[in-house]
Image: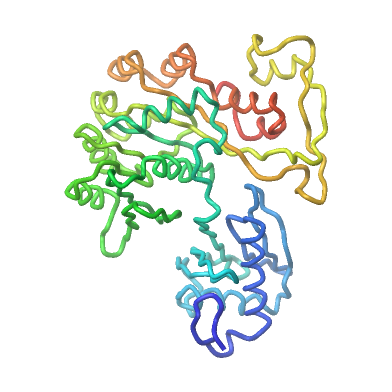
Amino acid sequence: MLDKLNNRPMLGAIDDAPVVSLVQQLLEQAVTLKASDLHFEPYENHYRVRMRIDGELREMTSPPMALKDRLSSRIKVLSRLDIAEKRLPQDGRMKLLLQNGRELDLRVSTLPTLFGEKLVIRVLDSAQAQLDLNQLGYEPEDLARLVEAIHRPHGMVLVTGPTGSGKTQSLYACLNLLNTAEVNIATVEDPCEIQLQGINQVNVQDKPGLTFAIALRAFLRQDPDVLMVGEVRDLETANIAIQAAQTGHLVLSTLHTNDAPSTLVRLRNMGTASYNIAASVTLITAQRLVRCLCPLCKERVSLPSDVLLKAGLPPDLLSGDAVDAFKPVGCAHCHKGFAGRTGIFQVMPVSADMQALILSGAGNQEMTQLAQREGVATLRLAGLRKVLKGITSLDEVLANTRYGA
């Protein structure tokens, strides 16, 4: 009998039928529900499995406590981890073969807790990735700014936001637009989450010493046109990426900051020279993901204008004492009134005036004020516009953005 996950013979007592079946069913269910992560969590008197769907964790099942160690061992064997090591965290990977013949890449992380090992499986499904910039949720004027920036022959475009905000998908949508036979594109990531034909992709590998910086240096000797760096984590990587952007290459990368203006301050705080930042960074996109209202059951509501003004909507976008919007209800086709997610974006070109502020050593507040004067919408405003369009709810936007940013 062959293992459905790795297409190899099953391995003894660990792979007893109930555990094999349960793991396979949970993984296939995660793919069906488009879950991004599975959590296997042991507690003192309880064991549960949760899945993150549309950014929200949902409890799916509670296997018997007697299966706790066998489930852990099964997953560790499949991901080629040491089943005897239960005191230290481990990271591994495995493949899931679906009935239609498609393979999924699964990343596994283990963590010792008080009552056993917690395991988290990240589902990396390239086929489910939305690689059309028009479908990600950009406003038309923001999309035009982004497309213009990525078609420049050189410069740096940065995407910022917290983990799970869709940064990688946005970058790959840009690469997909640029991916032609005439363009040499190379990426370095940790790990590569989306496989795209025609792009040279490299995984960071800590043990042999293949870091972002080393991969970037190698890329520069490979006659590249476009470089994508999964994340600017340190000064060395930042400086090499900026050097590439100043020497005739388009560089795309990510940072973890709250909004677009603070990204410029973060680069400076990392030790990057202000004149290099001003000369290389051409555009910054900050983003979040918000849940979409289910189109089958959402219910029209009237929101008082003062509530929207308090939330941060400019008065010129209001007319009258109330505005029509929608709220979640819930039906058999959604989860609590929501189905799927869309992006909200703050797209900030680095103008000549912004470059002058960078060179003067200005702080985040001054850069934010200039961006707003230049017509750059905040993330909160971008979310409120989607509320007015009936795409999401006011509570969802308030939960995922902060006032003034």
Instruction: Describe residue 17's horizontal placement relative to residue 146 as left or right.
Output: right
Percent coordinates x, y for residue 300 in the rendering: 82, 29
Q: Residue at x 57, y 32 (%)?
A: 344
Q: Residue at x 53, y 42 (%)?
A: 165
Q: From this view, report whether residue 395 is shown above or below residue 215.
A: above
Percent coordinates x, y for residue 148 in the rendering: 38, 27
- Tally the marks: 0
Quadrant holding the C terminus: top right
Identify which residue, 295 or 210, lies in the foreground: 295
Q: How is the image coloured?
A: rainbow
Instruction: Describe residue 97's horizontal placement relative to residue 332 as left or right.
Output: left
Q: Residue at x 78, y 37 (%)?
A: 328
Q: Residue at x 70, y 65 (%)?
A: 48
Identify which residue, 142 or 92, lies in the foreground: 142
| Residue 155 falls in image quadrant | top left
Percent coordinates x, y for residue 387 in the rendering: 69, 27
Percent coordinates x, y for residue 339 in the rendering: 70, 45
| Residue 393 falls in image quadrant | top right
Name of the residue lying farthest toward the left? 221
| Residue 101 falls in image quadrant | bottom right
Quadrant holding the N terminus: bottom right
Q: From this view, report whether residue 215 is shown above or below residue 161.
A: below
